[in-house]
Image (tube, rainbow, N blue to C red):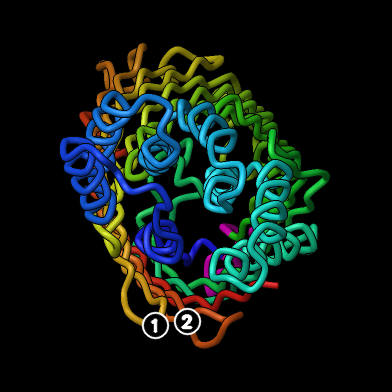
Amino acid sequence: MKKLTVSFVVWICFVAFPATSPATEAVYEQHMARGVGAIESGEYKAAEIEFRRAAREKPGDPNATLYLGVALSRGGKDEAETVLKEALLLNAGNPRAPFELGFHYYMRDRYDAAAEYFEKAARMAPGTEVSRNAESFLTAMKEKGEKKRWSLNLSGGLQYDSNIIVSPDDRPLPAGISERSDVRAVFLLKGRYMIFSGNKGDLSAGYSLYQSFHQNLEEFNINQSVPDLKGTLNLAPWLTFRGMYSYESTNLGGGQYSFAHTINPSVVIREGERYSTVLDYRWKKTRYRNGTFFLTNSDRTGRDIAYVITQNASLSKTVQGRAGFAYDEDRTRSDFWDYNGYRTFAGLTFLLPRKSFLDISAEIYRRKYNGEYPGFGVFRRDTTRTYSANAGIPLSARYTLIAGHTYTEAASNVSDFSYRRNVTGLFLNARF
């Protein structure tokens, strides 16, 4: 329902219900006209300035107060709520004021408050454009409330991997890189159940399952299951806290390879409609098991902590960007597996016609290890560069075909960990 554009809402406010008290001062009229023009152009800060000036020319003027509230609301200012409530008192018989207050709450996902004012606007002006749009918002909110609590995503496809890495998160093998290629079938399931959801936040439980079947290298078949619990808390229109706990169990070649507990709190800061910053902290404790091929795998048992900052930007209606930096450190049973990592990353997502998309990304990850690697007499230093491209084409409302390619190049002063890798895949994704 948010397809109702800002310009259309402004048109409703300023055209469908023109001001009933014409300005008597020329200066007031000039500021009001400039303010309306600025709103229609999306220049909300300029509109705010003009309406404040108009309000100074005519203190307590109902129209100047209402339009100032509109400009503040469109600009994402918290002050909008106070000004629009004042406008509601000054415009007791005008349905525009409750409609705008309802729209302000709606855009901030405060649906209970929004419904109260949309209902009031609809009652005050039955049969008008404002009433019809208020009722449309009410219908949309009702549909949101009736949405099913669960979601399910299934993906299946084929991948060619030129250099097998053991786990889905691409952590290197404990005894070096395989230098073996193969084709594998991959199946991925993701399910989520919404325990509760409201204006203040939500809580949900999820489960994901990853399974690979290699054509030739059956000993590298992976089964990974991850149940999790996620929650969000909306602290302010511009600030959200998120938290997640997960338990990860990974089997390799039919035997236990590792299991891990992860705690991941994060903060989302919204800087207007186009930008947001995400601050992440991740604590992960992993226990590795020794196996037939990896006799010293348990040496890597320990904990990893990471700090990540990501900047998201809406560069245009069809281009979304992201960039960030991460620091992490791993502490294990053996100092030659301990490291400090520094990762820089960036990406662009292009929204193409017919809901298709293209996503490209790149990252550089440097690791500095804290102990001499056995047999080499040096402190290991790795630099890994990864470049990815994925494209999706919807086949229907439920099914999407996704093709992707990832190229990785790792340089290390320990030759066993220098490699190049190409992974190409084709998947069919289904949403339920």
Residue 402 can be seen, yes or no: yes
Which mark is drawn over residue 354? 1
Name the residue beneath numbered marker 2.
Answer: 394
Label 2 amino acid? Pro
Numbered disc total: 2
Q: Residues within 10 Å of mark 1 (few under 14, many from 20)?
A: few
Residue 52 place in picture, x, y as percent: 29, 28
Q: Nearer the viewer, mark 2 or mark 1?
A: 1
Quarter-of-image position of residue 277 = top left
Q: Where, quadrant-wise, is the N terminus in this rendering?
A: bottom right
Mark 2 or 1 closer to N-term? Answer: 1
Taking depth in this image into account, of 339 and 68 the one nearest to the observer is: 68
What residue do we see at 72% from left, 39% from top? Answer: 202
Label 1 amino acid? Arg
Taking depth in this image into account, of 303 and 347 the one nearest to the observer is: 347
Residue 410 can be seen, yes or no: no
Quarter-of-image position of residue 72 = top left
Residue 297 place in picture, x, y as percent: 57, 32
Residue 271 place in picture, x, y as percent: 36, 33
Taking depth in this image into account, of 187 and 197 the one nearest to the observer is: 197
Q: Which stretch appears magenta?
A: 209-220
Marks 2,1: beta carbons within 8 A? yes
Q: Where, quadrant-wise, is the C terminus in this rendering?
A: bottom right
Q: Secondary structure at mark 1?
A: helix
Residue 207 place in picture, x, y as percent: 74, 51
Q: Secondary structure at mark 2?
A: strand
What residue do we see at 51% from left, 61% from top? Answer: 2
Q: Is residue 398 left or right of residue 22?
A: right
